[in-house]
Amino acid sequence: MKNTLAILSVITLVVTSCNFSAGTKADLVSGLSSSWNGLSAETIYFVDQEDQSITNKQVSWNTECSFVFEGISNYTLKDGNAFPGITLTVTDPSGAEVVAFGDMLASYAEGVSPTDAGVLRATLTVGDPMKVGETYTVTARVFDKQNAEAEIVSKVSVKVVE
């Protein structure tokens, strides 16, 4: 019994002393789902151009919508800086890629402060080649350029309306 308690204590100490995070979360109202491994975020939103949460699973043509990630932590720092990346893709119901933006933070080659890296936004302008009346899956991926396995992936399915 003492050996079992000692082993559990060691496991608990090892697990709680690591800066590791993994999990999933789904918002049934908005349809936003997120998963993370290595990185974590306190809050993740999918908002319209007025920063209001999109809860009706619809985005209007010729407007902007954004994923907002707040409280991102657990970056692997290099010289005191974080090296975040963020991508955005839109796929149609068959899974075909309609829009894809590579790393939208590629220009920050020297990294940014962990505070600045703690809040990120990926914005999409709803327009061509998307089509009114169609439903799309919009995916944002935040990642750590210093740790290939650390990421946060958020997805939402939305219908484009006039």
Image (cartoon, grey):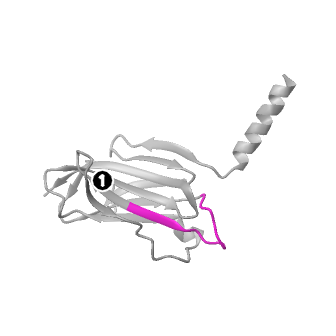
Q: Residue furthest right?
A: 2
**Which residue occupies 33% across, 49% down?**
156
Whole-percent x, y for residue 52 in the image: 32, 59
- Foreground residue among 122 and 42: 122
Predominant secondary structure, magenta span:
loop
Q: Is residue 65 above or below residue 18?
A: below
One can see residue 42 in this view: no
**Which residue occupies 45% across, 72% down?**
106
Would residue 13 be found to the left or right of residue 159 on screen?
right
One can see residue 7 in this view: yes
Tell me the magenta residue range: 74-87
Could you tell me how many numbered marks the image carries? 1
Q: Quadrant of residue 81?
A: bottom right
**Which residue occupies 33% across, 55% down?**
53
Whole-percent x, y for residue 101 in the image: 34, 65
- Mark 1: few, some, or many residues within 10 Å (few <14, many ≥20)? many
Whole-percent x, y for residue 154 in the image: 40, 51
Q: Is residue 155 above or below residue 89?
A: above
Residue 83 magenta: yes
Would residue 73 be found to the left or right of residue 5 on screen?
left
Q: Quadrant of residue 146?
A: bottom right
**Which residue occupies 79% across, 38% down?**
10
Residue 95 magenta: no
- Describe the element under mark 1 as helix, strand or loop: loop
Whole-percent x, y for residue 57 in the image: 26, 48
Amino acid tagged 1: Ile
Q: Quadrant of the N terminus?
A: top right
Q: Quadrant of the C terminus?
A: bottom left
Would residue 3 be found to the left or right of residue 130 on screen?
right
Would residue 149 be found to the left or right of residue 66 on screen?
right
Which residue position is annotated with label 1? 54
